[in-house]
Amino acid sequence: MTLNLNDCEGCTACDLATTRRSVVVSRGNSSSRLMLIGEAPGAQEDAEGRPFVGRSGRALDSLLLEVGLDPDQDLYVCNAIKCRPPNNRRPKKGELRSCRPWLDQQLALVDPAVIVLTGATAVEAILGIKGGMTQLRGQWQSWEGRAVMPIFHPAYLLRNPSREEGAPIDLTRRDLAAVRQRLCEPWPDSGSQP
Ligand code: URA
Ligand code: SF4
C-alpha cells in the first residue's frame, strides 16, 4: 500500500495521536536538494503545526542564515516523528517505527542530495548508529547515495550558548557551512546540478 503524505495529518498509528494537538509534517521547500531531520515536535511546534518554530528553531534558522542558507527556500525541514511526545520525552522505538513510513514518504518526495541530521535520535533513525554527537557531528556519512551530515541538536546549542571558537555553536556553523559548500558541488553521478 502506498501512503499519501496528505493523509499524515489524520494519522493514528501510535499513541501520540491521543495527546498531540497538531501533526507536525514539514516546513520549507520540498523541491530543494537539502533535507533536515530533527527529533520530534515540541510545545510550540505542536501548537503551530510547523517544525522548528520554537526557540530551537530560531537558533537553527539564525545559523542557517549565517552560512547563507535561506530557511524557507534552501531546505525542507521535518522530524523523525510527527507528533509531540508528552513532556518532550525522547521518542520511543515503537513510535519511531510507526512513524517511519511518513518519513520515507518525505524522503521520496524531496529526494534530497544532502541530509542534515540534528541530534542523536535522527542519526539513529537514519544511519542506525548510536553514539555521542560530539564524535559523530561534522563527519560526512553516506546513506542510500545521499550525503549525510550529523550536527548537534539546536536544543543542545541553547544549553551551550558560548560563541567562542570551538564551542558547539561554532562547530555547528562550520558543519552547516560544509553542507552549503556540498550543495554547490555538482551531483556525483550526473555531473551537473539539477
Ligand atoms: N526539536 C526538534 O527536534 N524538532 C522540532 O520541530 C522542534 C524542536
Ligand atoms: Fe502517526 Fe507519527 Fe503521529 Fe504516531 S507520531 S500518530 S505514527 S504521525
Image (tube, rainbow, N blue to C red):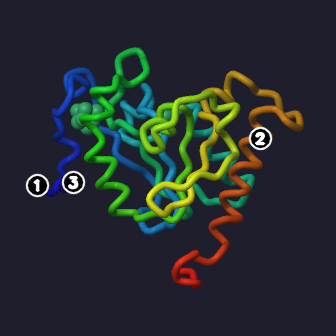
Q: Nearer the viewer, mark 3 or mark 1?
A: 1
| Contact (Cβ within 8 Å) of mark 3 with mark 2 | no
Amino acid beneath label 1: Met
Spatial CA span between label 3 and label 1: 15 Å
Q: Residues within 10 Å of mark 1 (few under 14, many from 20)?
A: few
- On-image quarter of the N terminus: bottom left
Q: In what element is the residue under mark 1?
A: loop
Residue 154 lies left or right of residue 138; in this view the side is left
Residue 110 lies left or right of residue 150; in this view the side is left
Residue to which mark 2 is pinned = 171
Q: Quadrant of ligand 2?
A: top left
**What residue sits 34% from the left and 23% below the top?**
92
Residue 55 lies left or right of residue 18; in this view the side is right
Residue 87 coordinates in the image, percent (x, y):
41, 15
Q: In what element is the residue under mark 3?
A: helix
Q: In what element is the residue under mark 2?
A: helix
Residue 128 coordinates in the image, percent (x, y):
45, 38
Q: Quadrant of residue 188?
A: bottom right
Residue to which mark 3 is pinned = 6
Numbered circle sitting on residue 1: 1
Which residue is more in the foreground, 8 or 123? Answer: 123
Mark before the other along the chain sequence, 3 or 2? 3
Residue 158 coordinates in the image, percent (x, y):
67, 27
Q: Is mark 2 within 8 Å of ligand 1?
A: no
Amino acid beneath label 2: Leu
**What residue sits 19% from the left and 56% below the top?**
4
Vertical placement of residue 144 versus 84, above or below: below
Residue 36 coordinates in the image, percent (x, y):
51, 50
